[in-house]
């Protein structure tokens, strides 16, 4: 193949085709295996990844894209940004410290353990990274040589790789530096990066990939300066080592002029998210190697290869180019060939990481040797595109008619909140500070085993249903016993809050092995929205109705909201996201109305991904927020005033979106606030949020049981800012990842905290 055309991979999934990394990590954490077993599994996965990429025609193979937990955490360890509480005193960072940073440490220090680093969303993906924490006097030093070690490990196996580093500017911008601009830390950080580059060059590396996805954000002049300083330092320190600067998830926007002026040898362009950057093939400096991200690294659709060739061929000329996925393939499942149960028509439209590499190799061959050399592959791609867009499975005229008939009145409750509130008070008769939970109770191994047995046909439908009904009954009885005012059924029947609904909706397909890392050892199988979405039958009504039949207390039904269903699925790319969201909202509207008819007085429509859906650039926010609010309203406004609509959001910073949350007009919103000690409530307070709020008082990410006094103090903080009638008492989020041994005492304490608050509220305030 002509040396002008290479096939690059910016990063590959780490988890293993059979989730080998999850098994190894969880076994190590449980003490069932030792560090040697874990590191051997990790090395095996890296070797397999390199082999798989080479066998599929990738010529620019990455190293250091692997991580035991998270690549941002790895970067913190590499540069020695290890907060004091982890007790690291220099030298090598042991696995124990690494995992303490990721997951916290139990049973030490005064407050009952050491808190993990915070975790948050990686740009607009469902991947979560560990937030770097910088002290005011933060210093950096080279603590981990992982990039060099993994480069050499590959070399020994016969692979010349391009090591991947998270760039220093993005790294700093993603971190938390109390009261300080994190970019002021750059001069201290750069020498560590320079040392890494020097060592990589000395080990023989020709290229390094520096990821600076912050370039897809609105950056100010300080960030531009930082990028200039960093790349200049790299060029000075390791002049022989070529830098491929990679940004993805969007166009460079206002950063473009700066980017084109940086002293780097290569530039990666995300041409899937930002096809408008195509002219850079002509306009970028001649000597710059361009990595053309033409295959979607965020989605699972087969690429229209002919269209890509038609677009690129007139522009590439004599330039050296690499054909690449738009971003790391971390965000897609590994291999479509493992999916034996997919509808063959749908399967023919898909490409997972392995198939994406094949596509890239086809494109490179077409360039190097002519289209006729890949005629079969192009014909297959054309056929997939044609059949997909024309398929009756994709297009449902009834759904199109229904979305076309949506009007503004369907998207808002007929009566204002004040009127609804009185009607609901009368119906529900709840005390002040009512207690509830967010929906899920522990997904014990018994529950998962039963579901797995049922899926494999080893447990009959009747037995599985009886098992789930039994779990629900036990949970409802227990909630009654401890005095939860608004119980839930526990979501035992759900494998995942998105996949469960996807499996029941028309227009959705789901996989058996299509796992994608969400954080650490927690993975999800995002369902695939391939066609117009509708609800053939009620999805949750039987379980919620069963739960309600067991108690006189008002049971809350839980559904996953339209925006979250969209965000956490692979979404078709032939229809605007807003339109797909509207279809889901209409399907959910039917479910909400059916739950009401089945006697549920409260229905919670979860939107934890509402904030995450916010586009990376501010200019695009308003349009998104308009349709996102509209879709929530569409899903929830089909009910009477007496039906209480709840929503729930976690993992969210609310300042940017508080007006839209107001516009959603849910009767009650529960939010995650305990870890920030109610700081996140401030947005609601400043905005004078008029409806009811459940600020989380129990951090469900930790096994720790919060004492009554601690929850009372949090509620008192909330009561200083909100009226007592506004406040609900609940945990931060669902309890599916916790154990009953933790949940039971924690909820007992939560109920006790609510009772103390009630007892301490003067009658005048209570009567308001
Ligand atoms: C709230 N969060 C979620 C996000 N995205 C989602 N799609 N869903 C979410 O809930 N994004 C933000 C956060 C991220 N947080 C989490 C939290 C927890 C998980 C998690 O626990 N994932 C599970 C997989 C869940 C699942 O699909 N379970 C299935 C399959 C279980 C399984 O592996 N079965 C085995 C057999 C088991 C046995 O025999 O014991 C098998 O099939 O081989 C189920 O329960 O049926 C995980 O294990 O990682 C994810 C994101
Ligand atoms: N109802 C869901 C929301 C998670 S964000 C749960 O309780 O798990
Ligand atoms: Zn949540």
Image: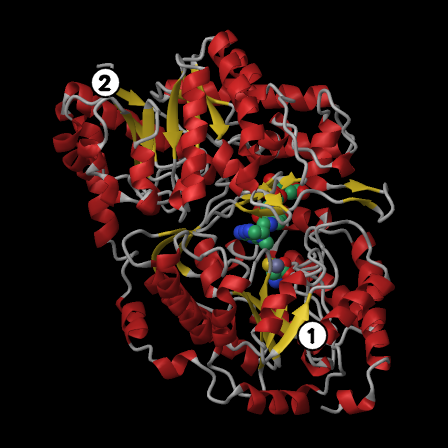
Figure check: 240 above or below 644 = above
Residue in the image at 20% along x and 23% along y:
319
Secondary-structure class at tag 1: helix
Circle 1 Cα neighbour tier, 10 Å, few/some/many (<14 / 14–19 / ≥20): some
Image position, residue 627 (x, y; %)? 38, 68
> Is 150 or 762 nearer to us in this picture?
762
For this view, does 538 lie left or right of residue 493? left
The answer to whether residue 168 of the structure is visible from this angle is yes
Where is residue 482? Give x, y as percent: 84, 70
**What residue does disc 2 label?**
4
Tag 2–tag 1 contact (CB < 8 Å): no
Query: For the C terminus, which image quadrant?
Result: bottom right
Q: Earlier in the sequence, mark 2 or mark 1?
A: 2
Q: Which residue is mark 1?
A: 721
Q: At 47% across and 84% down in the image, what residue appears?
A: 413
The quarter of the picture where residue 101 lies is top right
Note whether residue 533 is visible: no
Ligand 1 neighbours mark 2 (CB distance < 8 Å): no
Task: Tell me which residue sits at (57%, 89%) in the image.
Answer: 418
In this rendered view, identify the residue nearer to me: 586 or 620. Answer: 620
SS at badge 2: loop
Count the numbered circles shown.
Answer: 2
Q: CA distance from mark 2 to mark 1?
A: 63 Å
């Amino acid at each position: 193949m002509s040396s002008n055309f290479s096939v690059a991979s910016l990063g590959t999934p780490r988890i293993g085709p059979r989730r080998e990394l999850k098994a190894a990590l969880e076994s190590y954490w449980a003490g069932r295996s030792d560090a040697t077993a874990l590191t051997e599994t990790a090395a095996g996965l890296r070797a397999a990844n390199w082999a798989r990429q080479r066998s599929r025609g990738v010529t620019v193979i990455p190293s250091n894209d692997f991580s035991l937990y998270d690549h941002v955490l790895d970067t913190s360890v590499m540069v020695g940004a290890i907060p004091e509480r982890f007790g690291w005193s220099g030298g090598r960072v042991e696995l124990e410290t690494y995992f303490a940073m990721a997951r916290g440490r139990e049973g030490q220090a005064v407050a009952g353990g050491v808190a993990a680093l915070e975790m948050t969303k990686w740009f607009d993906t469902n991947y979560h990274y560990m937030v770097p924490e910088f002290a005011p006097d933060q210093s950096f030093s080279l603590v981990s040589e992982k990039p060099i070690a993994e480069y050499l490990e590959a070399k020994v196996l016969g692979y010349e790789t391009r090591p991947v580093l998270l760039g220093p500017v993005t790294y700093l911008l993603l971190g938390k530096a109390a009261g300080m601009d994190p970019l002021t830390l750059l001069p201290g950080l750069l020498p560590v990066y320079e040392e890494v580059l020097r060592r990589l060059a000395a080990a023989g590396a020709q290229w390094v990939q520096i990821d600076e996805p912050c370039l897809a954000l609105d950056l100010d002049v300080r960030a531009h300066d930082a990028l200039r300083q960093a790349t200049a330092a790299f060029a000075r320190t390791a002049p022989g080592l070529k830098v491929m600067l990679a940004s993805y998830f969007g166009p460079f926007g206002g950063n473009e002029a700066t980017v084109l002026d940086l002293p780097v040898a290569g530039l990666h362009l995300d041409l899937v998210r930002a096809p408008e950057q195509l002219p850079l093939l002509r306009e970028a400096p001649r000597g710059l190697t361009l990595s053309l991200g033409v295959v979607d690294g965020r989605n699972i659709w087969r690429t229209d290869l002919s269209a890509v060739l038609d677009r690129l061929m007139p522009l590439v000329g004599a330039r050296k180019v690499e054909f690449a996925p738009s971003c790391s393939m971390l965000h897609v499942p590994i291999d479509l060939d493992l999916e034996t149960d997919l509808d063959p028509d749908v399967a023919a439209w898909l490409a997972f990481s392995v198939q994406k590499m094949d596509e890239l190799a086809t494109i490179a061959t077409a360039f190097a040797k002519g289209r006729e050399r890949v005629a079969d592959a192009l014909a297959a791609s054309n056929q997939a595109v044609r059949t997909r867009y024309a398929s009756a499975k994709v297009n449902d005229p009834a759904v199109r008619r229904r979305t076309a008939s949506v009007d503004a009145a369907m998207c808002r409750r007929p009566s204002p909140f004040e009127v609804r509130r009185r009607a609901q008070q009368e119906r529900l008769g709840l005390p002040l500070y009512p207690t509830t939970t967010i929906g899920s109770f522990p997904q014990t191994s018994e529950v998962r085993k039963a579901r797995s047995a049922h899926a494999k046909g080893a447990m009959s439908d009747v037995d599985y249903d009886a098992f789930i009904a039994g779990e629900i009954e036990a949970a409802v009885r227990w909630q009654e016993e401890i005095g939860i005012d608004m119980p839930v059924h526990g979501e035992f029947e759900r494998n995942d809050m998105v996949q469960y609904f996807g499996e029941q909706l028309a227009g959705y397909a789901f996989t058996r092995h299509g796992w994608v890392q969400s954080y650490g050892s927690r993975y999800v199988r995002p369902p695939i929205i391939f066609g117009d979405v509708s609800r053939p039958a009620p999805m949750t009504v039987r379980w919620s109705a069963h739960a309600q039949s067991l108690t006189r207390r008002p049971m809350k039904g839980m559904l996953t909201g339209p925006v979250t269903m969209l965000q956490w699925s692979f979404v078709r790319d032939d229809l605007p996201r807003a339109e797909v969201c509207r279809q889901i909202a209409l399907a959910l509207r039917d479910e909400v109305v059916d739950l009401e008819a089945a006697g549920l007085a409260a229905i919670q429509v979860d939107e934890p991904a509402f904030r995450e859906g916010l586009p990376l650039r501010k200019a695009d926010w308003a349009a998104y927020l308009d349709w996102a609010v509209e879709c929530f309203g569409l899903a929830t406004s089909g009910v009477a005033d007496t039906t209480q609509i709840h929503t729930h959001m976690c993992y969210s910073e609310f300042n940017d979106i508080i007006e839209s949350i107001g516009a959603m007009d849910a009767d009650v919103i529960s939010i995650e606030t305990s870890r920030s000690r109610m700081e996140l409530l401030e947005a609601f307070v400043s905005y004078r949020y008029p409806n009811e709020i459940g600020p989380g008082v129990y951090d469900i990410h930790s096994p720790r049981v919060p004492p009554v006094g601690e929850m009372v103090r949090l509620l008192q903080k909330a009561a200083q800012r909100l009226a007592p009638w506004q406040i609900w008492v609940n945990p931060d989020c669902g309890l599916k990842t916790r154990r009953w041994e933790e949940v039971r005492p924690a909820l007992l304490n939560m109920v006790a905290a609510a009772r103390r608050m009630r007892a301490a509220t003067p009658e005048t305030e209570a009567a308001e």
